[in-house]
Image (cartoon, rainbow, N blue to C red):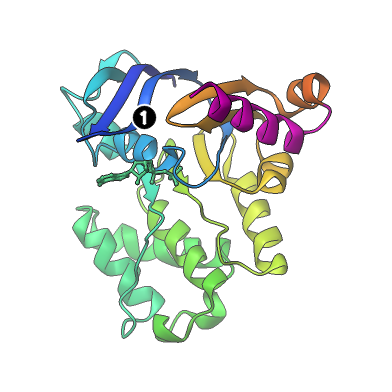
Amino acid sequence: MELEIRELAKRYRSIVAVNDFSLNLGPGILGLLGPNGAGKSTLMRMIATVTRPTAGSITLDGTNVLKSPDALRRTLGYLPQDFGVYPHLNAVEFLEYIAALKGLDRRSSRERIERLLEMVNLTYAKHRALGGYSGGMRQRVGIAQALLNDPKLLVVDEPTTGLDPEERVRFRSLLQDLSGDRIIILSTHICSDVETTANDVAIVGGGKLLERGSPASLVNRWGSLENAYLKTVALNKEAA
Ligand code: ADP
């Protein structure tokens, strides 16, 4: 599986959210690292076919996603940053509802929901209303809904924001368990999220791709991942 992003751009009136962004991706976990406002969510929304680019192209295994989004959508799992839950539904009801929206078969999705709840460690709380869940539990429901269709492309936008340290560690290890033959794109502004989970890093600032490489290669070049992040973002700001 290969995702190819070519010269992608998104403008909102005078704001350039993403600019001339090119990236090729195969299976593995890509950490999109960048400060708030860098353009990470906009990029992810374009990959998830929620937002249309102003310019550029996205192809998945050679298919133009902008012209034919259905193939990507069938194999996409997306956890948006502002993922909201229905507070009065319990986890099973919520996942059944999302499975129905995704057009999944009722019987097989029931089995899958049970398996996913086990995988995200929520079986014990599956009949509790989501309104009473902690931030980490909600994010795990969010990942479960993204995994309902067994996606080969998983896009998770700042999933660790607001999690306490224990929840964050658990969430990272869940993402690692999910890798394998999937393409996982994880955005964050927290270097340690990337350091512990990603095998590939893209540093984003001002809508542009500033650096790309394995965590080890960036550490080699910049001394630490944090340094790579802080320096490239600062240099880009100076240049702007
Ligand atoms: P990040 O996810 O890295 O925090 P975003 O993609 O959310 O960055 O935002 C990039 C830039 O685009 C910001 O300046 C933001 O204000 C702007 N932006 C994002 N979405 C919209 C929108 N729907 N309308 C106008 N401006 C937007």
Image vertical order of residue 7 relative to residue 236, above or below: above
Image vertical order of residue 189 relative to residue 21, above or below: below
Q: How many marks?
A: 1
Judge left or right: residue 95 versus residue 215: left
The magenta segment? 223-240
**Foreground of the two, 223 or 89:** 223
Q: CB of residue at label 1: within 8 Å of ligand 1?
A: yes
Q: Residue at x 25, y 30 (%)?
A: 71
Residue wearing tag 1? 18
Q: Residue at x 44, y 21 (%)?
A: 1
- Report if residue 93 is visible in the image: yes
Query: Looking at the picture, which amino acid does disc 1 mark?
Result: Val
Q: x, y percentage for residue 2?
A: 43, 19
Q: Residue at x 59, y 47 (%)?
A: 189
- Which quadrant of the frame does ligand 1 lie within? top left
- Report if residue 60 is visible in the image: no
Q: x, y percentage for residue 142?
A: 43, 61
Which element type, helix, strand or loop, lies under badge 1?
Answer: strand
| Mark 1 Cα shell of 10 Å, populated few (<14), some (14-19), many (≥20) | many
Image vertical order of residue 37 relative to residue 69, above or below: below
Q: Residue at x 20, y 58 (%)?
A: 101
**Foreground of the two, 173 or 20:** 20
**Foreground of the two, 54 or 49:** 54
Q: x, y percentage for residue 156?
A: 46, 47
85 magenta-colored: no
- Please, which residue is most extreme toward the left here? 67
228 magenta-colored: yes
